[in-house]
Structure formats: structure tokens, C-alpha cells
Amino acid sequence: MRYANITGWGKCLPPAALSNDDLGTFLDTSDEWIHSRTGIRSRRIAHVSTSALATVAASHALAAAGMDASRLDCIIMATASPDSLVPSAASAVQQSLGAGRAAVFDINAACTGFIYGLSVGSALIKAGSMQRVLVIGAERLTHYLDWTKRDTAVLFGDGAGAVVLEASEQPVGLLADKLGCDAEARDILAVPNSGTDRRRFEHIDGLFEVNFEGKEIFKRAVKGMGDAAAHVLDQAGVTEQDIDLLLPHQANIRIIETLAKKMALPPEKVMVNIAQYGNTSAATVPIALCEALEQGRVKPGALLLTAAFGAGLTWGAGVIRWGDRITPLNRSDATLPPCEQSALELLAPAIMGCRQAHGG
């Protein structure tokens, strides 16, 4: 039987950090208000495209795997904020990496996108059609935000994470997974009037709205992630007590704590980094994985559980058996171009544009 081992991992966080105090300079909010409700203290603002973030994360993942990009069979890009709809953001990453023989495509499952991509990439390898697959979660969600709306402007940040999957005969990688969607309530977390639904030739091009019904999202997120997690544990033939580390989607600290409590997992078995980065959507799980490895929280043979919930309302979970290696084979010097502006300076045109669109 074939398995899909995770042999490389990498992340990319843009350097410009927007603190809660920074938000308080143009919104009626404070660090105490934001942190007590979300667990977030800061988030990153990208000065480059989504594919640029993805390319740097992918370069580090490939170096960690000791692999040249030309050997990749496939690139799967999970994102709800691509550079363009046509062509795909994955094709831009292929071009930047020099991965000319790889098939490429984007997946939009919002915050659950990386788990969807991990499932698809693993299945391609297990089926024997591919040997080496790069899975990326990357977002530049700050592009969509209405910076006059406190409830959503404080939540999101930009970033990317990636993993390399390689065929293996050892029982490692994604051992069990469950994907789904609660479409009945799809409108409670949405960017309406976008895509081909967006009205043309009406003076709205500078403003997006994010519909975010927090209380209902919280309830459905806990249920969706919890049910999916229970399913994959049963599918893998393990229990909560067997899990060495939970890698949850980093959307809200209260959701994470509720899920961990439901599974009776102590804090030392739960990876949390939402304070530094906010919700980076499809990028949260791979970024958290990279940081868990950096912090020595993933041991050889560790059993990992991941779960996520996103717009759509998509949900998913997976049980991962880690392989033997927890350190990169090589290091990449890939980095983003220098950023000459602070996060507030980067956002100044967007903030002004949002105010003008609202007549302010």
C-alpha cells in the first residue's frame, strides 16, 4: 500500500505587522477588546501578491525535502484570495519555482483549503498517478477587508505555508480524512457581490464586504470541526488520548479552546499561534505545523490531528502520522522583496478608500 509522507515544510509571513494598537488609531477598538474576544494581538499585511507569499513558502518546503522543483508532479494551491482567477495562482508559483513538469490547480475551500489540498494530494499519490506533490495554503485576505468595519477588520492576516508529499511504503502521512460542507448556512460567512455575481459598471470596485455572523459561525465551527475530528479518529482506529498534537485552524481562541476541551486535550497538546498572525485562512494549518516543528513539538512518529472550518461552510479534519525526520535536509535563502513601509502605511490607501466609499 502506498502512503504520502510529508517530507518538506515551509512558511512565509510578510514582515509588516499590524498590532491591535495600530488598529485603534483608525477604528473604535483596543487591544483589550480584540484580544479578549479573539486571542489576536497582531497580524501581517502583505506588500506582495498571494503567489509571491506561496512561492517563498514552497521554496522552503522544497529545500526541507531536499527536492528540486523540476521533480514535482503537481502543485495544489489552496487559496480564497488568488492573484487572479484566470490564470490560476498555482501557475504563477509553478513559473516562479521552475516546476515545468507539474500539473497545477487552485482550490477554494476558504479556511479548510489546506486540509482539502492535503487530502487531494495524498489521494493522487496513494492512487499511484503521482509521486511528488506540493500543497500550499496561501492568503492575502486583507485585500478584501472593509477597514471601517471593526468586527471583520481585526480578524484576518496574510501569510503562506506549504508541504511536500512524497510516495512512501511506510504508514505515514495522512492516514484518515473527512471533508464536508454545511452549505445550508453558506451566507453567514461570505464576500457577497464578488466573482461574476459582482455588479459591473456601478461605482463599487474599491469596496468589498465580508458578511460575518460571529455567534452562528462559532456554533457551527465547533460542531463541524468536532464531528469531523471524531470521524477521522474512528477511521484511523485511534482515540483522543493517542493524539500527540492538535493543529487546529487559527480563527478564534475560543473556538480552539472549546474544541480542545471537547476532546479533553491539555494545552501542551494544542498548537496555538493566533496571537501573532490572526486568521490567515488556508495558511493557518501549514504555518502552525511549521512552527510546531520549529518549537520541537513534533517528534518522529508523532500522531497529529488537524481540523478546520471555513466559508461555504466547509469543514474538514485529518489524522497524520509523522515520519522519522523532523529537521530540514536543506535550507532555502528564498525571501520576499524588502518592504519599505509599515503596515499602517501599506493600508493607508485602502483605509481612505473604504471611508470614501461609505461617504466618510
Image (tube, rainbow, N blue to C red):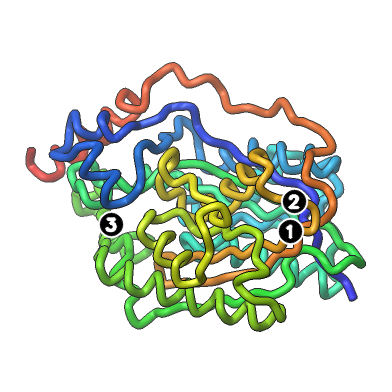
Q: Nearer the viewer, mark 2 or mark 3?
A: 2
Q: What's the mark number on residue 302?
A: 1
Say which residue appears at 54% left-offset and 62% top-offset: 113
Q: Secondary structure at mark 1?
A: loop
Q: Is residue 121 left or right of residue 210?
A: right
Q: Position of residue 305 (x, y in %)?
A: 62, 65
- Amino acid carrying label 2: it is Lys
Where, quadrant-wise, is the N terminus in this rendering?
bottom right
Q: Which residue is mark 3?
A: 210
Residue 352 location (% of width, % of height): 19, 32
Rounded to the nearest angstrom, the CA distance separating label 3 from label 1 is 38 Å
Mark 3: which amino acid?
Val
Secondary structure beneath disc 3? loop
Camera-near label (3 vs 1) is 1
Neighbour class for label 2 at 10 Å: few (<14), some, many (≥20)? some
Which residue in the protein does label 2 denote?
A: 299
Q: CA distance from mark 2 to mark 3?
A: 39 Å
Q: Earlier in the sequence, mark 3 or mark 1?
A: 3
Q: Residue furthest left?
A: 359
Residue drawn where x is 13% and y is 39% of the image? 28
Residue under the image location 24 percent in, 46 percent down: 146
Q: Are marks 3 and 1 in contact (CB under 8 Å)?
A: no
* Contact (Cβ within 8 Å) of mark 2 with mark 1: yes
Mark 1 Cα-neighbour bin, 10 Å: few <14, some 14–19, many ≥20: some
Kindly identify the amino acid type of the residue bearing the numbered disc 1: Ala
Q: Residue 98, relative to residue 114: is it above or below?
A: above
